[in-house]
Amino acid sequence: MAIFRDRKQAGEQLAEQLTQYAKREDAVVLGLARGGIVVAEAVARALDLPLDVFLVRKLGVPGNEELALGAIASGGVQVLNKGVIADFGIGGEQIQQITEREMRELERREQAYRGKRPPVKVESKLVILVDDGLATGASMRAAIRALRNLHPSRIVVAVPTASTEACADLQNEADEMICLQTPIPFLGVGAWYEDFPQVSDDEVRHVLEKSRT
C-alpha cells in the first residue's frame, strides 16, 4: 500500500517536519539527483529556501543494478558497502570499472544540470539534504561525506521513506535525521509511492532553472 501520491506530495509532507528552518538566511535545500530534486523542490518552496542539486551516483551490483555496492559523490568521495561486496563476491578490479563509469556519468550530469552556473555556497550554512527515499543509504552516506568537505555548519537529512537500517545507520553521519516512514518490510523506495516515474535530466534542469527565477 502506497504512502505518498507522488514525490511532490512527499516533499510537502516532509516540509511540515522542517518548519523550524523556514526562511532562515543561513539555510539551503539540496536534492539528490535525480529523484530527490523533485521532493527537494517542494520542500524548498514550502520553507522559502534556496534550492540546488547535489550529485551522487550509486554503484550498482552487476546484474542487479538497483542494489548498491556503494556510491560516489562530487569531490571524489567513494563509499563502499562491504557486506554487499562480500555477499556477491565482487572483486576490486570490477569495482574500479564500475566507479570509473559512474564518475563519467556524474561529471556529465554536473555539466548538463548546471552548465556554467556555480553550485550554491554551503560553507557555514545549514544544509537540508533531501532524497525520495533510502534503501541501503549508500548514496546518502556518500553525499553527507562529500558535503562535510565543503564545511557546512549542520547537515539535516530529510527523506519521506527509508528502510529502518538505513535510517538508523545514517543517524551517526548526519547532524539530524528525519525519516517520515520506515515501513517493514521495506520492499524498495518506489513501493511507497502511487506515482514514481523516472526523473529525466530535462526535469532536473527545469526545476533548477525555475528555482533561480
Image (tube, grey):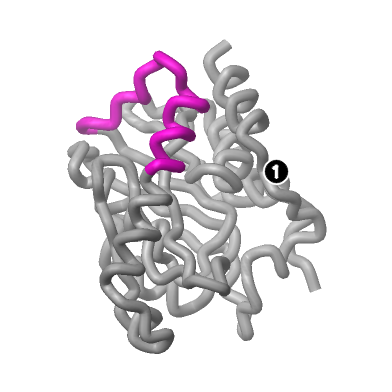
Q: Quadrant of the C terminus?
A: top right
**Residue 177 visible from this viewpoint:** no
Q: Is residue 186 left or right of residue 197?
A: left
User: Where is 80 relative to 149, above or below?
Assistant: below
- The percent coordinates of residue 97 (x first, y second) are 35, 59
Please tell me in which quadrant of the rendered image residue 2 appears: bottom right
- The percent coordinates of residue 155 (x first, y second) are 31, 48
Is residue 173 inside the magenta stretch? no
Q: Which residue does the image show at 48% across and 65% down from the upper left?
A: 60
Q: Which residues are magenta?
A: 104-124
Q: Which residue does the image show at 58% across and 50% down from the upper left?
A: 14
Q: Amino acid at mark 1?
A: Lys
User: Where is 172 relative to 142, above or below?
Assistant: below
Q: Which residue does the image show at 30% across and 79% down from the upper left?
A: 82
Which element is circle 1 on? helix
Q: Which residue does the image show at 65% across and 29% down from the upper left?
A: 202
User: Where is 141 relative to 13, above or below?
Assistant: below
**Residue 179 visible from this viewpoint:** yes
Most extreme residue toward the top is 213
Mark 1 burial class by Cα count in 10 Å: few <14, some 14-19, many 20+: some
- The percent coordinates of residue 118 (x first, y second) are 35, 19
Please tell me in which quadrant of the rendered image residue 39 appears: top right
Q: Quadrant of the N terminus?
A: bottom right
Q: Nearer the viewer, residue 19 or 118?
A: 118
Is residue 107 inside the magenta stretch? yes
Q: How many marks?
A: 1
Most extreme residue toward the bottom is 87
- The percent coordinates of residue 209 (x first, y second) are 58, 18
Q: Is residue 77 left or right of residue 195?
A: left
Q: Nearer the viewer, residue 188 or 62?
A: 62
Mark 1 — residue?
8
